[in-house]
Image (spheres, coloured by chain):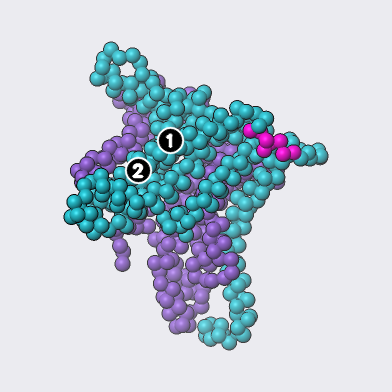
Chain colours: A cyan, B purple
Amino acid sequence: MAHEVEVNIPRPARRRRQGWATAALLAPAYGWLLLAVFLPLCAMLFFSFLKTSPLPGRPLFYTVNNYLAFINRPYLFDVAWTSIRIGLWTTGLCAVIGLPAALALARATSGRSKHVLFLLIILPFWTNGLVRVFSWTMVLREGGLLDYALHLVIPGAPAFSLLYSFPAIIIGLVHAYLPYMILTCYLSASAIEDGYVEAARSLGARTPVVFWKILLPLSLPGLISGSILIFVPVIGSFMEPRILGGRIGVTMGTVIEDQFTAAFNWPLGAALSFIMLAVVLVIFAASARVLRAGGALQ
Amino acid sequence: MIALGRAFLAATLVFLYLPIAVMVAMAFNASPLYTLPLEPTFHWFGVLAQNGPLLAATSNSLVLALATAVIATAVGTLASLALNRRSFRGQSLLKVLLLPPIAIPWLITGTAMLLFFFWTGIGRGLHAMLIGHVALAIPYVVLIVGAGMQNLRAELEEAAMSLGSTPLHAFFAITLPLLAPSIVAALLFAFAVSLDQFVVSYFLATPGVSTLPVEIYTSIRKGFTPEINAISAIFLGVSAVLVLVFAQLSNLGGNRDRR
């Protein structure tokens, strides 16, 4: 029988066969990732040191100027600062809304309603992000839903529009990334044992004290991993700032997009992408322990 | 405190669903400028049916999502088997290598793919998008199927093999059927990842060949009519159904143990 045949093969040979089988199982997936993610990232690193995009038959010129762009083109500094401000505001607001919502979901609901609410919170996540951002333009624009509601309450009020402003970008991004924060905080919050809260209450602690001394510290891993999961993609966002910010929505993301789609300065775009990637890696490295504790990494 | 918590949760849900509700409502609103009050009409669905490029992009999206789901699930399930059922050197490194496609902003991944595909002659278009989408979906498939495999006890396969079944037969007779819900969940997730993917598609699209999200982005920048809302409303329904099925299969939310 097959099994006995296996046993009769000498051990090193069997191990070698197992090794080949493992490699065969892994090869398609990792080969694919190599082709589509890792080699392209290497190519981008190479491009970022070129003077111009390589053309067939032309000699290559190497330069580090693309990395000095922040010195050569001072406006990039403002752009980077805008991106960081957008990242901080979005992450902060997601924390302020997401943590209480997660605590409420974990502690103030139960059974079937908890299950349904959980699904309701992650459902928007699966609808197209572009469509959600575009929907905000219909809410925030002059004559949009907010303006309309305002005029129902105060008939003579002047026309009101939030569109193409910094707050509009933040609203759109908070909406897009809030479910991340609720999810990660929910994982932490639902692990908090009722006993701690009851003990504090029986010792006379009021709600704010319970929050600051018990719920917040114990939710911290979720809060931090949520913040990282939000901050990283937000500083790379370009679609939301473009649609909701209009002319003021110039971020690192939109500048990089322009280098690739409009200016055709791929080496500069590659260098800016790599600077952003470096920032992302630093954030991940600095927070690896927290992320692991929060369960975001395996 | 409980009442306060519930009120806060309700307010959060209103915020999350406000733009979605507006989008659906505007799909049925007569005004092409999205002005209120609402005048109900099905007009935009008719306009949508006449819009060739938009329908072509939609069918591209569906084909791409289907192909991505099938390939990523097959390839990812194999890798998941190796990562969860075997032990070898470099295993934890390989697990870490699954994270970059998820964790690096898509803007960076997308532009890197554009550079590399253009440079190597792979070029842009649907095939390039397929390569990109599958790569983005593989890590999710490995994680979802891996989670299912951890709930499945290895003893079951070992029992089959000790009763004389070959590893291959044990896999098809025991592992695969028990793993089926996770595999279907992974399939749906990969489908959804591809269907909603905009950034990578955007950099790999050519003027003639795009997907629905890319087409929507282009239209938004040009200024467009509510037929986009109409097709978005249809897609919203599709996505919602997918998520509900996914949630049912993958035991999301955690309080519905199948054991």
- Left or right: A62 as drawn, with respect to A167: right
Q: Say if mark 1 contacts mark 2, CB within 8 Å.
A: no
Q: Residue at x 32, y 57 (%)?
A: A191
- The crowd level at tag 2 (other Cα within 10 Å; few <14, some 14-19, many 20+) is many
Q: Residue at x 47, y 74 (%)?
A: B170
Of A86 and A53, which appears nearest the observer? A86
Do marks 1 and 2 share a subunit?
Answer: yes
The secondary element bearing badge 2 is classed as helix
Q: Start and end of the magenta stretch?
A: A63-70
Is B31 situated above or below A90?
A: above
Q: Quadrant of residue A12?
A: bottom right
Would you say the magenta stretch is mainly helix, strand or loop? Answer: helix
- The crowd level at tag 1 (other Cα within 10 Å; few <14, some 14-19, many 20+) is some
- Left or right: A183 as drawn, with respect to B103: left
Q: Position of residue A258 (x, y in %)?
A: 60, 31
- Left or right: A60 as drawn, with respect to A29: right
Q: Which mark is residue A98?
A: 2
Q: Residue at x 28, y 18 (%)?
A: A151
Amino acid type shown at disc 2: Gly
